Amino acid sequence: MRNFISVNQLNAKDIFLIIETAERFRQKEAPINKQVFVANLFFEPSTRTKMSFIVAQRKLGLEVLDFHSESSSVLKGETLYDTAKTFESIGANLLVMRHEDDTWYDELIPGLQVPIINAGAGKGEHPTQCMLDLTTIYQEYGYFTGLNVVIVGDIRHSRVARSNAYALKKLGANVYLSAAPGFEDPTMDFPYLTMDEAVETCDVIMLLRIQHERHEARYEDVSYIETYGLTKEREKRMKEHAIILHPAPINRGVEIDTSLVECNRSRIFKQMENGVYVRMAIISKLLNDWGIINDSFEKHTKTYAI
């Protein structure tokens, strides 16, 4: 694996290798005994993803090069490529990047000689979020085939929805979408359910926030949760074993009733915990595949039920 850009580049074996490696790191941290520099280039706001990467990097013993676009040469007109090339030139061995453009990495990959991790690409993909979501689901059920997963919310503007839908389909899950009018994505070929159908169908319900920053008009919060959100009444109609996911940040009282954020079904904060170990696994695999470190990942693989 040369870069970690999209879950579409992974087959089932690749996905389970990352899940297994993440679990190894959860059980026993294994710092890298070599000086390795990693740069976090975030051009969009981030709390969970950026901090999760930093914790993962520090647990691995890496040297972290931080970056703030608002105080960088970007303000002087420096291009994305030149910013990335600068960090490569001063010694960064790995770049972790988030940018508002859907395909920002297409410009960078041909000219860079270091691996890149996609930490979010506009409305395109968010593959490390997808991997931590898959890990959380697998921890719960131990398989994917036949699971009913409903992704609910602002589908049109969600990179999380796109990454998860196709990865889950590849692993054999039944994927459904649910969205308010105007929030659908006609490019994604999955069946739509109403919210009332969704709560009765799902084994996993994955809620998405309304991305107000990508909308011209603001949706009224009260009407949204009553019609399209997860209310306490709807939660009572979910299957006994069904779980709630959310990539966060959470708009409490909008896509989910605030009392459900930490209810027994919720795995929202478990997802965040899993994100650290999943990102440790992805970073380690890339560094290994590039020969920057040496670890035989394949020897750790097991046979998993999809």
Image (tube, rainbow, N blue to C red):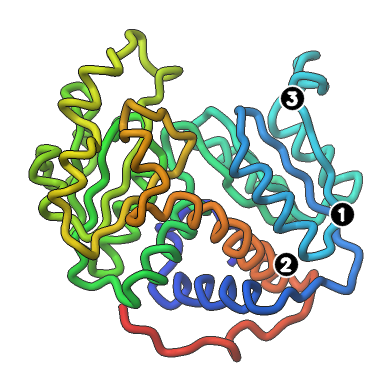
- Outermost residue, top direction? 217
Judged from the image, the secondary structure of the residue bearing numbered disc 3 is: helix
- Callout 1, which amino acid? Glu
Q: Measuring from the top left, give residue 206's x and y in whole percent.
A: 31, 47
Which residue is found at the position 32% from the left and 26% from the top? 254
The answer to which of 132 and 223 lies nearer the viewer is: 223
Picture layout, residue 76 above or below residue 187: above
Q: Which residue is mark 2?
A: 287
The crowd level at tag 1 (other Cα within 10 Å; few <14, some 14-19, many 20+) is some
Q: Which residue is mark 3?
A: 69
- Callout 2, which amino acid? Leu
Q: Does residue 170 appear left or right of residue 51 in this picture?
A: left
Q: Measuring from the top left, give residue 169's x and y in whole percent.
A: 25, 61
Mark number for residue 63? Answer: 1
Q: CA–CA distance between discs 3 and 1? A: 19 Å
- Please tell me in which quadrant of the rendered image residue 194 appears: top left
